[in-house]
Image (spheres, grey):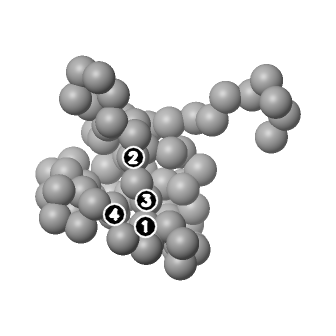
Amino acid sequence: MSPSATPRHYSTDDASRVLAVKSNTLRTALYQQHHYFGIRPTKLPNGKWLWPADQVDALARGEVPRAQDVAA
């Protein structure tokens, strides 16, 4: 990634569509486990979450998250 490129992110609704799950599935996993299959979103000041698009896309392709991503 070039220094000037900014990472892409998905909203919770967009991430749920990519992963073919309900948005509440992501929210529930986040509140209970602090991640969804190793993906940890960033919380915005307005309370919404931004999910890293590269990790969401990788999970949608069936790739397993790295162990460090899942560590509590």
Classify 50 as above or below 58: above
Residue 39: numbered disc: 3
Residue 38 - label:
1
Q: Are marks 3 and 1 in contact (CB under 8 Å)?
A: yes
Q: Quadrant of the C terminus?
A: bottom left
Q: Are marks 3 and 4 in contact (CB under 8 Å)?
A: yes
Percent x, y for residue 30?
Answer: 24, 57
Element under disc 1:
loop
Label 2 belongs to which residue? 41
Element type where label 2 sits in the image: loop
Q: Residue at x 57, y 62 (%)?
A: 58
Residue located at (17% from left, 56% from top): 31
Residue tagged 4: 36
Q: Point out the tag, 2 or 4, that comes first from the N-terminus.
A: 4
Q: What whole-number distance in Å separates the C-alpha atoms at marks 2 and 3?
A: 6 Å
Q: Is residue 30 above or below residue 67?
A: above
Asked if 47 appears above or below 37 in the picture, the reply is above
Spatial CA span between label 3 and label 1: 4 Å
Residue 14, image x, y percentages: 36, 39
Q: Amino acid at mark 3?
A: Ile
Secondary element type, mark 4: loop
How far is disc 2 from disc 1 in space, using C-alphas? 10 Å
Q: Are marks 2 and 3 in contact (CB under 8 Å)?
A: yes
Q: Report the amino acid beneath label 1.
A: Gly
Cβ–Cβ below 8 Å for labels 4 and 1? yes
Give the distance between the C-alpha atoms of the residues marked 3 and 4, in whole angstroms: 5 Å
Residue 34 sits in quarter: bottom left
Quadrant of residue 44 within the rendered picture: top left
